Image (cartoon, rainbow, N blue to C red):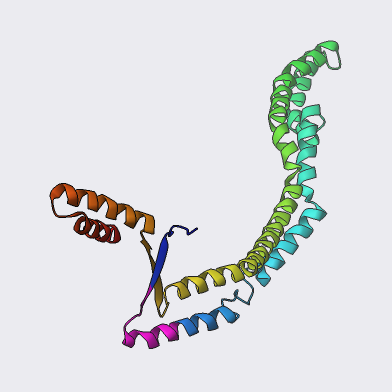
Amino acid sequence: MSKGGGNTRQVQSSTVEPPAFQKPFIEYGLSQAKQLYESETPQYYPGQTVVGYSPESEMALQGIRQQAISGSPFIKGVQDVVMQNLMGTNPLQSAAFRPVIEQVEAQTSKAGRYGSGYQQAALAQALAPMALEAQQQAIAQAPAARQFGFADLETLAGVGAAREAQQQAELAADIERFQFEQARPQEKLAQYLAATRGGDLGQTTYEAQQRQPLTSILGAGLAGAELGQMAGIGGGTGALIGAGLGLLG
């Protein structure tokens, strides 16, 4: 028992070559791409990428730090004065009250009431406006005096922030260098592949042609024979024409 003929495929290949004058340049480019890929380039900048403190800035930071740690005597002095004015115990405030006290004492002495309750009431009445004004000023100055107490600590914090910013810049430079080294092989490979893809010396293409099976040819011949008899040209002639068309198909 014979088997019917199956599909047959014919493969044709064709190679597209660049012009002869281009080949040396393409070959040179490919060789250079390979050398670049195998080389140590690109390299990260080998030097320090962060500017350090100048000697003047370093001395200034050290001096400010030491003064902040030692503390400023002005802060305690200002706070003491505000507290004395608030409590009415400031010696200068007492000195400012003295002219008013002497004036009241003189008046009560002339009236024969020196040392009496009348004199004490007159003194309180005369000094009350001045004492009230000093107290109100001290209350208004109290928040600023309290905040002033943090001046040394804030100065010290500023020195620390400057040093932290320098350390952060150095760390960022180290991280950037590390990431560069990690990504360099992949980037070089991508560049190498991109360069070699565009420099092929020849490209081969393949085309497949499919032949009709034998059963299809026979079927076309039978159909041609029938048409030949109907057309009056003979079945044999029609069969040959139909088979030929089957081969062309």
Q: In the displayed orientation, state which residue is furthest to the top.
A: 118
Query: Which of 238/94 is in front?
Result: 238
In this picture, is 10 found above or below 104?
below
Query: Is residue 132 at least partly visible in the picture?
Result: yes
**Which quarter of the figure has residue 134?**
top right
Query: Which of 78/26 is in front?
Result: 26
Query: Is residue 213 at least partly visible in the picture?
Result: no
Query: Which of 107/152 is in front?
Result: 152
As for residue 27 lying within the magenta part, the answer is yes
- Residue 184 at x, y = what percent? 60, 70
Q: Residue at x 43, y 85 (%)?
A: 27
Q: Is residue 86 left or right of residue 220?
A: right
**Which quarter of the figure has residue 38?**
bottom right
Q: In the displayed orientation, state which residue is furthest to the left.
A: 232
Q: Residue at x 75, y 20 (%)?
A: 104
- Residue 30 at x, y = what percent? 47, 81
Q: Residue at x 22, y 58 (%)?
A: 236
Query: Which of 237/36 is in front?
Result: 237
- Residue 25 at x, y = what percent? 39, 85
Q: Which residues are magenta?
A: 13-29
Q: Residue at x 64, y 68 (%)?
A: 177
* Quadrant of the snapshot with the C terminus: bottom left
In this picture, is 92 found above or below 52?
above
As for residue 232 lying within the magenta part, the answer is no
Q: Is residue 114 left or right of residue 184?
A: right
**Which quarter of the figure has residue 75?**
top right
Question: Total marks drawn?
Answer: 0
